[in-house]
Amino acid sequence: MNAIPVPPYEAEYRVRYTSGKTEWLPCQVVGVDARDAWSEGSFVIISEDDDGVSYVSMTDVVRRIE
């Protein structure tokens, strides 16, 4: 991982289900990552589940919450 930190901001990440439904869930963007010079890169996010447990993951699409 070649993550670059960014000032954290609130956003939503896209989840696509096998049924075809799309849902946007809240997250906080904390960085960007590029695997190599030829990749498009991903957002490094922190999300929280219903029990309050936080997870760090990566996603290709986010939309900023203003």
Image: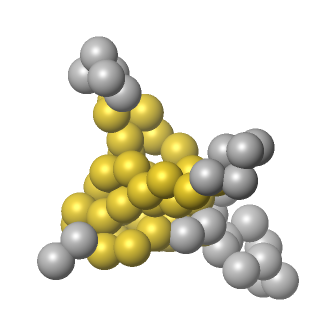
Asked if 66 appears above or below 29 in the picture, the reply is below
Q: Quadrant of residue 19?
A: top right
Answer whether residue 58 is visible to the viewer in this image. no
Q: Residue at x 71, y 53 (%)?
A: 20
Q: Horizontal and vertical percent for residue 62? A: 46, 69
Answer whether residue 60 is visible to the viewer in this image. yes
Q: Residue at x 31, y 23 (%)?
A: 50
Figure colour scheme:
secondary structure
Q: Horizontal and vertical percent for residue 38? A: 83, 83
Q: Residue at x 23, y 71 (%)?
A: 65
User: In this view, which residue lies farthest toward the top?
Assistant: 51
Q: Nearer the viewer, residue 36 or 57?
A: 57
User: In this view, which residue lies farthest toward the left?
Assistant: 66
Quarter that holds the C terminus: bottom left
Q: Residue at x 53, y 45 (%)?
A: 57
Total residue callouts: 0
Q: Nearer the viewer, residue 21 or 66?
A: 21
Left or right: 26 in relation to 44: left
Left or right: 36 in relation to 60: right
Q: Horizontal and vertical percent for residue 52? A: 25, 22
Q: Quadrant of residue 18?
A: top right
Q: Nearer the viewer, residue 1 or 56?
A: 56
Quarter that holds the N terminus: bottom right
User: In this view, which residue lies farthest toward the right?
Assistant: 38
Q: Horizontal and vertical percent for residue 12? A: 37, 60
